[in-house]
Image (cartoon, rainbow, N blue to C red):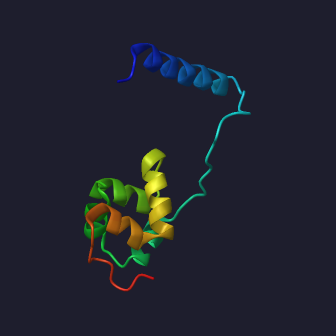
Amino acid sequence: MVKMSEVFESIKQGLTEAIEFSKGKTDRAVVHEFAPIDVKEIRNKVNMNQTEFASAFGISLDTLRHWERGDREPRGPALVLLSVVAREPKAVLRALSGDYELIKGSS
């Protein structure tokens, strides 16, 4: 059983690190930089239409369309997901559904 004091210390440490990071003290921080991605290119790579792609990866169809038009850019967890899909689409689909069959010729 986790003690309340252990939970408090963990939260306190996280907040302290976040405050240090916001002040520019990034020596202990792990920062992941992502290159801009072409969402339409990723979708085409897995050979899916917009509806299939949005459904397969839990993305709103409207959001997907905005990304593809360039009105908006994926950020945060969506950017991470799309970056992984760009590199390993079959693995992501297997992880999401067990044995997803919508990939039509992806490598």
Q: How many numbered marks have been drawn onto this rendered protein structure? A: 0
Residue nearest the observer in this picture, 74 or 17: 17
**Left/right of residue 31 with respect to residue 46 in the rendered view:** right
Above or below for 40 versus 81: below
**Left/right of residue 52 with respect to residue 2 in the rendered view:** left
Residue nearest the observer in this picture, 72 or 55: 55
Please tell me which residue is depicted at 61% across the width and 57% down the height of the picture.
Answer: 35
Quarter of the image holding residue 96? bottom left
Above or below for 16 versus 50: above
**Left/right of residue 78 with respect to residue 23 in the rendered view:** left
Q: Which quarter of the rendered picture does the C terminus lie within?
A: bottom left
The answer to whether any part of residue 106 appears in the image is yes
**Image coordinates for residue 85, horizontal then vertical, percent:** 44, 65
Q: Residue furthest toward the top?
A: 5
Q: Which quarter of the rendered picture does the N terminus lie within?
A: top left
Q: Residue furthest toward the bottom?
A: 105
Quarter of the image holding residue 29? top right
Please tell me which residue is depicted at 40% across the width and 69% down the height of the picture.
Answer: 91
Residue nearest the observer in this picture, 72 or 47: 47
Above or below for 55 versus 27: below
**Image coordinates for residue 47, horizontal then vertical, percent:** 36, 79
The answer to whether any part of residue 71 appears in the image is no
Above or below for 35 versus 13: below
Please tell me which residue is depicted at 32% across the width and 60% down the height of the picture.
Answer: 57
Please tell me which residue is depicted at 28% across the width and 58% down the height of the picture.
Answer: 61
**Image coordinates for residue 46, horizontal then vertical, percent:** 39, 76
**Image coordinates for residue 94, horizontal then vertical, percent:** 33, 68
Q: Residue furthest toward the front?
A: 1
Quarter of the image holding residue 44? bottom left
